[in-house]
Image: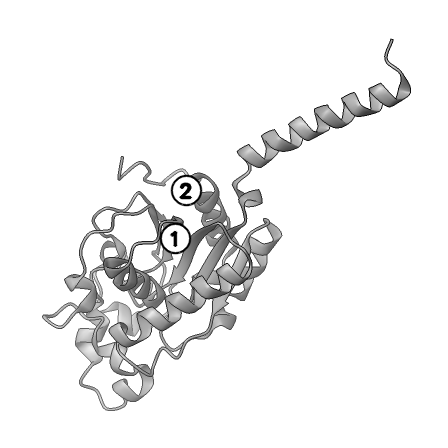
Amino acid sequence: MLSGCSQGKHTLTILGFLLFLILLSNPLLANDCVVLLHGMARTSASLDKIENSLQGEGYLVANINYPSRSGTIAELAAPAVEQGLSDCKAQNASRISFVTHSLGGILVRAYLENHELENLHRVVMLAPPNQGSAVVDAFREIPGYIWLNGPVGLQLGTGEDSVPLQLGAVDYDLGIIAGNRTINLILSQFLENPDDGKVSVASTRVEGMCGFIELPVNHVMMMRNRQVIDEVVAYLGTGRFSGENAETGLCD
Protein backbone atom coordinates (compact mmCIF):
# COMPACT_ATOMS: atom_id res chain seq x y z
CA MET A 1 0.00 0.00 0.00
CA LEU A 2 1.28 3.45 -0.92
CA SER A 3 1.97 5.92 1.84
CA GLY A 4 0.18 9.28 1.81
CA CYS A 5 3.35 10.94 0.52
CA SER A 6 3.77 8.36 -2.25
CA GLN A 7 0.11 8.66 -3.23
CA GLY A 8 0.52 12.41 -3.45
CA LYS A 9 3.55 12.11 -5.71
CA HIS A 10 1.74 9.54 -7.85
CA THR A 11 -1.25 11.87 -8.25
CA LEU A 12 1.01 14.79 -9.20
CA THR A 13 2.73 12.61 -11.80
CA ILE A 14 -0.60 11.70 -13.39
CA LEU A 15 -1.76 15.33 -13.36
CA GLY A 16 1.51 16.42 -14.92
CA PHE A 17 1.14 13.85 -17.68
CA LEU A 18 -2.45 14.92 -18.35
CA LEU A 19 -1.34 18.54 -18.54
CA PHE A 20 1.35 17.55 -21.02
CA LEU A 21 -1.26 15.85 -23.22
CA ILE A 22 -3.48 18.93 -23.07
CA LEU A 23 -0.60 21.15 -24.09
CA LEU A 24 0.05 18.92 -27.08
CA SER A 25 -3.57 18.82 -28.20
CA ASN A 26 -4.61 22.41 -27.55
CA PRO A 27 -3.03 24.89 -30.01
CA LEU A 28 -4.21 27.86 -27.99
CA LEU A 29 -1.85 26.91 -25.18
CA ALA A 30 0.99 27.26 -27.66
CA ASN A 31 0.58 31.08 -27.44
CA ASP A 32 -1.19 31.56 -30.75
CA CYS A 33 -1.52 35.22 -31.69
CA VAL A 34 -4.00 36.61 -34.21
CA VAL A 35 -3.28 39.85 -36.07
CA LEU A 36 -6.44 41.77 -37.04
CA LEU A 37 -6.37 44.19 -39.99
CA HIS A 38 -9.42 46.34 -40.73
CA GLY A 39 -10.73 47.53 -44.09
CA MET A 40 -10.49 50.75 -46.08
CA ALA A 41 -11.59 53.93 -44.30
CA ARG A 42 -12.24 51.94 -41.11
CA THR A 43 -10.37 51.62 -37.81
CA SER A 44 -9.40 48.83 -35.44
CA ALA A 45 -12.64 49.52 -33.54
CA SER A 46 -14.53 47.85 -36.39
CA LEU A 47 -12.92 44.53 -35.37
CA ASP A 48 -13.30 44.87 -31.61
CA LYS A 49 -16.08 42.28 -31.43
CA ILE A 50 -13.87 39.72 -33.19
CA GLU A 51 -11.00 40.76 -30.92
CA ASN A 52 -13.05 40.16 -27.77
CA SER A 53 -14.32 36.82 -29.05
CA LEU A 54 -10.84 35.56 -29.90
CA GLN A 55 -9.48 36.64 -26.54
CA GLY A 56 -12.34 34.75 -24.93
CA GLU A 57 -11.20 31.66 -26.84
CA GLY A 58 -7.70 32.03 -25.40
CA TYR A 59 -5.92 33.68 -28.31
CA LEU A 60 -3.47 36.52 -28.01
CA VAL A 61 -4.65 39.35 -30.27
CA ALA A 62 -3.00 42.31 -32.00
CA ASN A 63 -5.76 44.56 -33.38
CA ILE A 64 -3.87 46.99 -35.61
CA ASN A 65 -5.04 50.49 -36.43
CA TYR A 66 -3.41 51.73 -39.65
CA PRO A 67 -4.08 54.87 -41.76
CA SER A 68 -5.74 53.16 -44.71
CA ARG A 69 -6.35 56.39 -46.66
CA SER A 70 -2.79 57.71 -46.40
CA GLY A 71 -0.93 55.61 -48.95
CA THR A 72 -0.81 52.86 -51.53
CA ILE A 73 -0.99 49.14 -50.84
CA ALA A 74 2.79 48.93 -51.13
CA GLU A 75 3.18 51.73 -48.60
CA LEU A 76 0.60 50.38 -46.15
CA ALA A 77 1.25 46.63 -46.16
CA ALA A 78 4.63 46.33 -44.44
CA PRO A 79 4.03 48.84 -41.60
CA ALA A 80 0.60 47.39 -40.78
CA VAL A 81 1.59 43.72 -40.91
CA GLU A 82 4.91 44.24 -39.14
CA GLN A 83 3.23 46.20 -36.35
CA GLY A 84 1.03 43.17 -35.83
CA LEU A 85 4.01 40.82 -35.84
CA SER A 86 5.80 43.07 -33.35
CA ASP A 87 2.81 43.19 -31.02
CA CYS A 88 2.49 39.40 -31.14
CA LYS A 89 6.21 38.99 -30.45
CA ALA A 90 5.87 41.26 -27.42
CA GLN A 91 3.24 38.82 -26.13
CA ASN A 92 5.64 35.87 -26.59
CA ALA A 93 3.55 34.34 -29.36
CA SER A 94 4.81 31.14 -30.97
CA ARG A 95 2.43 31.08 -33.96
CA ILE A 96 0.83 33.86 -35.99
CA SER A 97 -2.53 33.94 -37.73
CA PHE A 98 -4.34 36.79 -39.49
CA VAL A 99 -7.99 37.78 -39.61
CA THR A 100 -8.72 40.57 -42.06
CA HIS A 101 -11.62 42.58 -43.44
CA SER A 102 -11.71 43.78 -47.05
CA LEU A 103 -8.53 45.80 -47.81
CA GLY A 104 -6.78 44.19 -44.85
CA GLY A 105 -6.72 40.90 -46.75
CA ILE A 106 -5.00 42.49 -49.73
CA LEU A 107 -2.35 43.98 -47.43
CA VAL A 108 -1.62 40.51 -46.05
CA ARG A 109 -1.45 39.03 -49.56
CA ALA A 110 0.91 41.79 -50.69
CA TYR A 111 3.15 41.31 -47.67
CA LEU A 112 3.30 37.53 -47.86
CA GLU A 113 4.07 37.75 -51.57
CA ASN A 114 7.53 39.01 -50.58
CA HIS A 115 8.01 37.75 -47.01
CA GLU A 116 8.03 34.24 -45.57
CA LEU A 117 6.81 33.76 -42.01
CA GLU A 118 8.05 30.50 -40.54
CA ASN A 119 5.49 30.63 -37.73
CA LEU A 120 2.49 31.51 -39.93
CA HIS A 121 -0.48 29.36 -38.97
CA ARG A 122 -3.73 30.37 -40.73
CA VAL A 123 -5.35 33.34 -42.44
CA VAL A 124 -9.07 34.16 -42.53
CA MET A 125 -10.23 36.94 -44.86
CA LEU A 126 -13.65 38.57 -44.65
CA ALA A 127 -14.90 39.92 -48.00
CA PRO A 128 -11.47 40.44 -49.59
CA PRO A 129 -11.54 42.02 -53.08
CA ASN A 130 -9.14 39.38 -54.35
CA GLN A 131 -10.24 39.92 -57.94
CA GLY A 132 -10.83 43.63 -57.49
CA SER A 133 -14.18 45.41 -57.22
CA ALA A 134 -16.18 46.86 -60.10
CA VAL A 135 -17.41 49.55 -57.71
CA VAL A 136 -13.94 51.13 -57.94
CA ASP A 137 -14.12 51.08 -61.74
CA ALA A 138 -17.49 52.83 -61.70
CA PHE A 139 -16.74 55.54 -59.13
CA ARG A 140 -13.02 56.28 -59.34
CA GLU A 141 -13.50 59.36 -61.54
CA ILE A 142 -16.22 60.89 -59.40
CA PRO A 143 -15.07 64.03 -57.50
CA GLY A 144 -14.34 63.23 -53.88
CA TYR A 145 -13.62 59.54 -54.41
CA ILE A 146 -9.88 59.87 -53.77
CA TRP A 147 -10.50 62.20 -50.82
CA LEU A 148 -12.82 59.62 -49.27
CA ASN A 149 -10.76 56.50 -49.97
CA GLY A 150 -7.19 57.69 -50.52
CA PRO A 151 -4.65 56.40 -53.09
CA VAL A 152 -5.34 52.81 -52.12
CA GLY A 153 -8.91 53.21 -53.28
CA LEU A 154 -7.74 53.46 -56.88
CA GLN A 155 -5.81 50.19 -56.69
CA LEU A 156 -8.72 47.89 -55.89
CA GLY A 157 -10.52 47.91 -59.23
CA THR A 158 -10.49 45.32 -61.99
CA GLY A 159 -8.40 47.18 -64.60
CA GLU A 160 -4.73 47.13 -65.51
CA ASP A 161 -3.72 48.98 -62.34
CA SER A 162 -5.51 46.52 -60.05
CA VAL A 163 -3.07 45.41 -57.37
CA PRO A 164 -5.09 42.35 -56.29
CA LEU A 165 -5.00 41.05 -59.86
CA GLN A 166 -1.23 41.49 -59.97
CA LEU A 167 -0.68 39.34 -56.89
CA GLY A 168 -0.05 35.63 -57.32
CA ALA A 169 -1.82 32.60 -55.92
CA VAL A 170 -1.64 32.09 -52.16
CA ASP A 171 0.48 29.28 -50.74
CA TYR A 172 -0.64 29.31 -47.11
CA ASP A 173 -3.69 28.07 -45.21
CA LEU A 174 -6.37 30.58 -46.20
CA GLY A 175 -10.08 30.54 -45.52
CA ILE A 176 -12.39 33.13 -47.07
CA ILE A 177 -15.79 34.31 -45.83
CA ALA A 178 -17.94 36.08 -48.44
CA GLY A 179 -21.20 37.95 -47.87
CA ASN A 180 -24.18 37.74 -50.21
CA ARG A 181 -26.47 40.43 -48.76
CA THR A 182 -26.42 44.12 -49.60
CA ILE A 183 -27.71 47.28 -47.96
CA ASN A 184 -26.41 49.46 -50.81
CA LEU A 185 -28.57 48.80 -53.86
CA ILE A 186 -26.83 51.56 -55.83
CA LEU A 187 -23.36 50.03 -55.56
CA SER A 188 -24.74 46.55 -56.09
CA GLN A 189 -25.91 47.59 -59.56
CA PHE A 190 -22.26 47.56 -60.63
CA LEU A 191 -21.43 44.18 -59.10
CA GLU A 192 -21.92 40.62 -60.25
CA ASN A 193 -24.72 39.07 -58.23
CA PRO A 194 -24.60 37.85 -55.49
CA ASP A 195 -22.63 40.54 -53.68
CA ASP A 196 -22.26 42.19 -50.30
CA GLY A 197 -22.71 45.77 -51.47
CA LYS A 198 -19.00 46.40 -52.07
CA VAL A 199 -17.56 43.12 -53.41
CA SER A 200 -19.12 40.29 -55.39
CA VAL A 201 -18.95 36.80 -53.95
CA ALA A 202 -17.04 35.60 -57.02
CA SER A 203 -14.38 38.29 -56.64
CA THR A 204 -13.47 37.23 -53.10
CA ARG A 205 -12.03 33.94 -54.33
CA VAL A 206 -8.33 33.44 -55.01
CA GLU A 207 -6.26 30.59 -56.36
CA GLY A 208 -4.73 28.48 -53.60
CA MET A 209 -7.35 29.14 -50.91
CA CYS A 210 -8.10 26.18 -48.65
CA GLY A 211 -11.61 27.00 -47.47
CA PHE A 212 -14.57 29.12 -48.56
CA ILE A 213 -18.00 29.91 -47.17
CA GLU A 214 -20.77 32.26 -48.29
CA LEU A 215 -22.95 33.80 -45.57
CA PRO A 216 -26.06 36.07 -45.59
CA VAL A 217 -24.22 39.20 -44.40
CA ASN A 218 -23.28 42.58 -45.87
CA HIS A 219 -19.84 44.10 -46.33
CA VAL A 220 -20.17 46.94 -43.84
CA MET A 221 -21.28 44.99 -40.78
CA MET A 222 -20.22 41.38 -41.40
CA MET A 223 -17.32 41.54 -38.93
CA ARG A 224 -19.84 42.07 -36.11
CA ASN A 225 -22.08 39.19 -37.13
CA ARG A 226 -22.15 36.26 -34.70
CA GLN A 227 -22.21 33.61 -37.42
CA VAL A 228 -19.21 35.18 -39.13
CA ILE A 229 -17.27 35.31 -35.87
CA ASP A 230 -18.12 31.68 -35.10
CA GLU A 231 -16.80 30.67 -38.52
CA VAL A 232 -13.61 32.68 -37.92
CA VAL A 233 -13.06 30.82 -34.65
CA ALA A 234 -13.83 27.47 -36.31
CA TYR A 235 -11.34 28.02 -39.11
CA LEU A 236 -8.54 29.26 -36.88
CA GLY A 237 -8.97 26.23 -34.65
CA THR A 238 -9.52 23.47 -37.20
CA GLY A 239 -8.63 24.76 -40.65
CA ARG A 240 -12.24 24.26 -41.74
CA PHE A 241 -15.45 26.24 -41.69
CA SER A 242 -18.37 24.64 -39.87
CA GLY A 243 -21.35 25.70 -42.02
CA GLU A 244 -23.22 23.19 -44.18
CA ASN A 245 -22.36 25.13 -47.36
CA ALA A 246 -18.66 25.40 -46.57
CA GLU A 247 -16.14 24.41 -49.22
CA THR A 248 -13.20 22.70 -47.54
CA GLY A 249 -10.01 20.96 -48.52
CA LEU A 250 -9.60 23.16 -51.59
CA CYS A 251 -5.81 23.22 -51.31
CA ASP A 252 -5.30 19.56 -50.42
- Scheme of colours in the image: one colour
Q: Choose top left, top right, bottom left or bottom right for residue 39.
A: bottom left
25 and 99: which one is in front? 25
Q: In this picture, is 62 found above or below 238?
A: below
Please tell me which residue is depicted at 17% across the width and 74% down the height of the picture.
137
214 on left or right of 164: right
Q: Identify residue for label 1.
A: 124
Q: Secondary structure at mark 1?
A: strand
Question: Which quarter of the figure is the N terminus placed in?
Answer: top right
Residue farthest to the right? 4
Q: In this picture, is 141 found above or below 9?
A: below
134 on left or right of 217: left
Q: Identify residue for label 2.
A: 241
Q: CA distance from mark 1 to mark 2?
A: 10 Å
**Residue 9, image x, y percentages:** 79, 24
Residue farthest to the left? 160
Give the crowd class for mark 2: few <14, some 14-19, many >=20 residues within 10 Å: many
Q: In this picture, is 246 found above or below 54?
A: above
Please tell me which residue is depicted at 83% across the width and 24% down the height of the picture.
8
Residue farthest to the top? 1
195 and 178: which one is in front? 178
